Image (cartoon, rainbow, N blue to C red):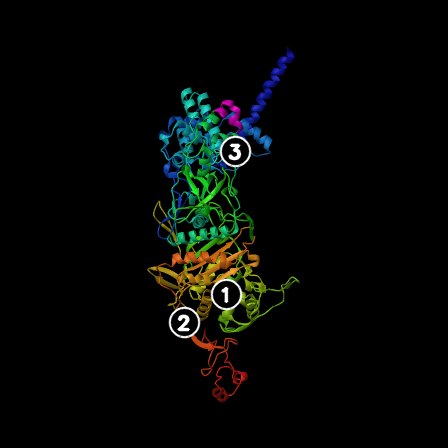
Amino acid sequence: MKWIKTLISSAFWLLIALLTTVLLGVAGAALYFTPGLPDVRQLQDFELHTPLRIFTRDGKLIGEYGEERRMAVDFDEIPEDFIQALLAAEDAAFFDHRGVDPRGLARASLELASSGGEIQTGGSTITMQVARNYLLTLDRTFTRKIREILLALQMEQILTKEEILELYVNKIFLGNRAYGIAAAAEVYYDKPLEELSLAQKAMIAGLPKAPSAFNPLANPERSLIRRNWILYRMRQLGNIDQASYEAAVQEPITARRHVAQVEVDADYVAEMARQYAVERFGEDAYTGGYRIHTTLDSELQPFARNALANGLIDYDTRHGWRGPEETDIPSGLAEAQARTERRGLEEELSESPEVLETARQAAERSQTEIEGVDGDVSNWLRVLERTPGFGPLQPAIVVANEGRELQVMTRGGELQTVEWDGLSWARAYRNPRARGPEPSSASEIASTGDLVRILQREDGSLRLSQRPDAEGSIVVLEPDTGAILALQGGFSFNASKFNRAVQAQRQSGSIFKPFVFLAALDTGLMTASSVVNDAPVVLQDGSNEIWRPVNASGDFLGPTRLRVALARSRNLVTIRILQTLGLDATIDYLEGFGFASNRLPRGLSLALGSADLTPLEMTNAYAVLANGGYQVSPWFIERVTRTSDDNLIEEASPMIACRACREDQAEVQIDGRTYRVAPRVADPTAVYILTDMLRDVIETGTGRAALSLNRSDVVGKTGTTNNQRDGWFAGYNRDLVATVWIGKDDNETIAEYGGNAALPIWIEFMERALDGRPEARPEAPSGLVQARVDGQTGRRLADGQSGGITEIFHPDYLPDMEPRRIEQEVEQSSGSQGSGSYEAIF
């Protein structure tokens, strides 16, 4: 018996020692971490905040970011059954514990030991989640968990359970930009919280664990299992009776997306403004009530967005049909649920087989039938609901493909027909330069259950479409200020957040050439009539390789005037101009147009646009041409205000082209606002001459399609890079400058020239943007000289010499006279004036 007493005594003291060790560990952790903890009392004064809002220059909403704090609820406004659902899902012992649940911590400890230091679920109580959401970061580490526990213990001493729960329900993220339960009720059901059914409340209560994985819009099959598990728990806890349980678990999914619409679609600019706000104000940007007013024009932005979308769709149509986005989609929710991935649902499914069975039954009760379609289409409707639109392209599911028609279902269960004239284009895509044969029936194009895209045409008929394989951007600036008036950084922000207008560094090709030509004009080394030999050239490229550049057409024109060379985009002429100017001197000159010298290649390929530049950088450089040679910079934040005190936080002070200002003038007042005067970086006469030369690109060169605008004030330049990877068009008049780029994100060829791919987009935009506006040509600088020159030599002809063509010149840089090669008296008597040739006499 003695050994038993000894054993009991030893066990007792061992237990005491262990408890003491634990208590000392807790005390030590508290002493170590407590000094660095945030003050819990600040939660008593926590203010609800207003989201960040982005506007056009005339006050139209283009974006809203941050927490929807305006819909906060007090504790006594929370329905009792919602509280019960939330506690059943997250913390059944909430009203009993002191902030920490020992059993939950035990589970977290096991995870900690098995995961090598990372906690996955954590066993957090609601109090601990409030501590984390309001006062701590979201990293899953051991030290954060200790701090979370200590804060939860403090919180329970200062706040009531009701106050803690109120903080929780107003802070939690519940998917689809809904923060807090009141916002979620509006987003998913478009109802006040108190009007939700028990099943709808349980659905929302199931979201905090994983707002994406259990989202009723994105994952209806999984959300049903989660919802019915919560209802099962509520019944087990005695919160609801059997009748309520049975009715709720059989209720079908009724969630739909209900979001406020912006007034102008400008997602890429809105995202630029959001990033600016975060850099400027930190995380307070989302809650501080900031209002950012951009320079965006609410009329021009839709023109730019639509022109780019239409142009990319047209390009894609020319290259073939790549097939449906998804195939073999189950029509009914029950079938989709049977196929769903069950990973992550282990806790819910292990509770009872009843959970899966009731979820299956609820899925079956979600059956939806629409006239004209046999069977349940509940899953098709939800797939369409959660599939985003891409620009003008909307999702549709093929219901039938008989003969030469596709019958499709669109959002809301509407059945529509795509006739053959909207299908016949769908020749199979093979590669960028090849397509398959024309289809002969709809069944060759898509099958029942396929997810496709449709486009509504102007006459209301439908056309099969697809997300374009190529991407693009369009940037529109105000030349005198550099203000961004319109910007679209891709086909659809929903499809890709990458902003190609400001982030994509692409070779600019021939739209870079005008700046090399301008350098020659500005320095006086050449004139518009100077002749340069368009002939083969062999060069060292700096890597022991021989570079043999060619013209895109593969031919050579021989001696060619600069005006003709620019209109026809002759590569070899441009290279010889750069050789004459000198690489270093040219790069120094180009800095005045916003080009960073460290990003310009130190080689003659620079003449052909080998520098990697963004569409915004190229547009800004063209703005300097459009404004007559003043160095403006692109900008888009006009002012920032704050709703709480209506204070002006900051206001832009851009540089502006001021032709009436003195050379030494630093500022100018316009309409009561002060602007900095932009420095002049190019001679106005040289810029005017270059603009006149660029008009020839439209009149006789690679941009002739722009003649359809029937305007004499627009000029521009096409551009295409090696292997047709990029297509460009940059152009302007006195009021607007716009640049279009089209290419592929993977740098694959688009198999088209800029004049085919980019120019039609620019034309469509300019046609809308300039409609009703008078022509806006630059004023000719004083001193500009007109003179006749010989079309072959580019030299001036004397008054007595006939023939030739008229050219314009800077008064200081007139070309030499064409020499007479016979006596004037002989020329006059022979009638061969201006020929300069003895052969003409005979």
Q: Amino acid at mark 2?
A: Pro
Write down the quadrant of residue 188 in the picture.
top left
Earlier in the chain: of badge 1 and badge 3, it is 3
Q: Start and end of the magenta stretch?
A: 345-357
Earlier in the chain: of badge 2 and badge 3, it is 3
Element under disc 1: helix
To which residue does mark 2 refer?
781
- Between marks 2 and 1, how big is the CA–CA gap? 19 Å
The image position of residue 327, as x and y in percent, is 52, 39
Element under disc 3: helix
Nearer to me, 443 or 230 = 443
- Between marks 2 and 3, how big is the CA–CA gap? 72 Å
Kindly check if marks 1 and 3 are in contact, taking CB atoms under 8 A apart as contact.
Answer: no
- Left or right of residue 283, residue 18 in this image: right
Q: Amino acid at mark 3?
A: Lys
Q: Amino acid at mark 1?
A: Phe
On residue 145, which mark appears?
A: 3
